[in-house]
């Protein structure tokens, strides 16, 4: 059976399984006449303003025909105007949830809102898709990211909610998620980020992007008790943070299994010290050394190359001018040392 499925996939790849939007020969078989295959098992609807259920026939996704396959695993609902941050797709009050029989692993929704312009009821549309692994929502109305929004998606490995209008994240938002490894939420409107919202996903989360908020992120804090996390890539660039607070740095476990990158470029760190030697960097320096020491000991113990750690920061009064001279990159070859902050308390 496995080889048969591989053969089908190979045939589709060789034949270049594609259809054209609006093709009169295939249009009647798709949820919308402008939907089409953009690759094997990938169904794309990106040339129309969708109103679900009005002009989008969900039932066609389950038709056993030669045009629509039940094993479609990727669904992309977009529209031509999404790059202009307009809401071009609507989920109406009569929308039917995608059936659990539809083996969706990856869903991308762009430009969505509710009827009347409210928050997009994405959880309703995807209420019966337990297989969902990747969810991407862009240029859509969300407002507050909360537990209700994510309650249906317990098996998500990647959540990408970049470029929406998210201005707040409730404390228990990520509690439903048990396997989350990648969280991308840059380009929203978060001015304050409470690090405690990550406590429930601390054991699984590996990558976090919260960069380029508009207005910029200016407050990073931890309201709850201490927890440890093994993030190996963290991006907070293009923010207005003068430091990464100690209560946040304390959550960075030194025992990350992999190369670690912390990107705080284009933040007003050490305005008067282009070499990043101001006291606001002291806590990061302490973590940097402890993590480097642990990686070296672990590598020596098992005879492997130590995993690296990199801190990218923009320091000095020219941090907001784009000058390359203001960017410092600390690596094992150019370490961030506690001795640089001996006079800090």
Image (cartoon, rainbow, N blue to C red):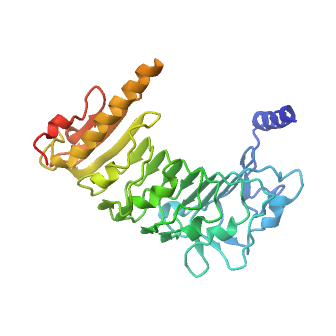
The residue at the far top in this view is: 303
Residue 132 at what x, y percent from top left?
A: 68, 54
Q: In front: 175, or 239?
A: 175
Is residue 341 shown to the viewer in this render? yes
Side (left or right) of 251 relative to 72: left
Q: In front: 308, or 68?
A: 308
Side (left or right) of 40 relative to 264: right
Say if 115 sits above or below 286 in the image: below
Residue 70 at what x, y percent from top left?
A: 83, 53
Residue 34 at what x, y percent from top left?
A: 72, 60
Residue at the spot 82% in from the left edge and 62% down from the top edge? 60
Say if 159 sits above or below 273 in the image: below
Q: In front: 7, or 185?
A: 185
Residue at the spot 50% in from the left edge and 66% down from the top edge? 172
The quadrant of the image that shows the N terminus is top right
Looking at the rendered structure, the number of numbered marks drawn on it comes to 0
Residue at the spot 73% in from the left edge and 64% down from the top edge? 128
Is residue 214 shown to the viewer in this render? no
Q: In front: 179, or 7?
A: 179
Q: Quadrant of residue 124?
A: bottom right
Residue 102 at what x, y percent from top left?
A: 78, 57
Residue at the spot 25% in from the left edge and 52% down from the top edge? 243
The residue at the far bottom in this view is: 116
Say if 56 sits above or below 70 in the image: below
Q: Quadrant of residue 75?
A: bottom right
Side (left or right) of 250 relative to 113: left
């Amino acid at each position: 059976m496995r080889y048969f499925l591989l053969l089908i996939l190979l045939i589709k790849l060789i034949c270049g399984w594609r259809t054209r939007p609006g093709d009169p020969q295939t249009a009647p078989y798709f949820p919308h006449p402008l939907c089409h295959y953009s690759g094997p098992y990938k169904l794309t609807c990106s040339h129309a303003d969708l109103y679900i259920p009005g002009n989008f026939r969900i039932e066609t996704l389950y038709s056993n025909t030669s045009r629509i396959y039940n094993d479609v695993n990727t669904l992309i609902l977009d529209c031509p105007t999404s790059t202009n941050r307009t809401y071009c797709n609507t989920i109406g009050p009569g929308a039917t949830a995608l059936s659990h029989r539809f083996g969706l692993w990856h869903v991308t929704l762009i430009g969505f809102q509710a009827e009347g312009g409210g928050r997009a009821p994405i959880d309703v549309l995807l209420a019966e898709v337990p297989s969902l692994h990747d969810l991407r929502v862009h240029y859509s109305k969300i407002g507050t990211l909360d537990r209700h929004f994510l309650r249906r998606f317990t098996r998500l490995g990647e959540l990408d909610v970049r470029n929406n209008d998210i201005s707040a994240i409730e404390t228990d938002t990520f509690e439903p998620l048990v396997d989350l490894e990648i969280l991308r939420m840059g380009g929203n409107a978060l001015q304050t980020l409470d690090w405690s919202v990550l406590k429930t996903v601390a054991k699984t989360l590996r990558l976090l992007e919260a960069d380029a908020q508009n207005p910029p992120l200016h407050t990073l804090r931890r309201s709850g008790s201490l927890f440890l996390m093994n993030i190996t890539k963290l991006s907070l660039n293009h923010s207005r943070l003068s430091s990464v607070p100690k209560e946040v740095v304390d959550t960075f476990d030194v025992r990350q299994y992999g190369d670690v990158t912390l990107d705080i470029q284009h933040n007003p760190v050490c305005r008067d010290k282009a070499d990043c030697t101001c006291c606001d960097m002291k806590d990061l320096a302490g973590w940097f050394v402890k993590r480097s020491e642990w990686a070296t000991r672990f590598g020596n113990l098992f005879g492997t190359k130590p995993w690296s750690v990199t801190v990218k920061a923009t320091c000095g009064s020219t941090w907001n001018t784009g000058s390359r001279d203001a960017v410092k990159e600390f690596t094992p070859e150019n370490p961030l040392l506690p001795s640089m902050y001996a006079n800090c308390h």
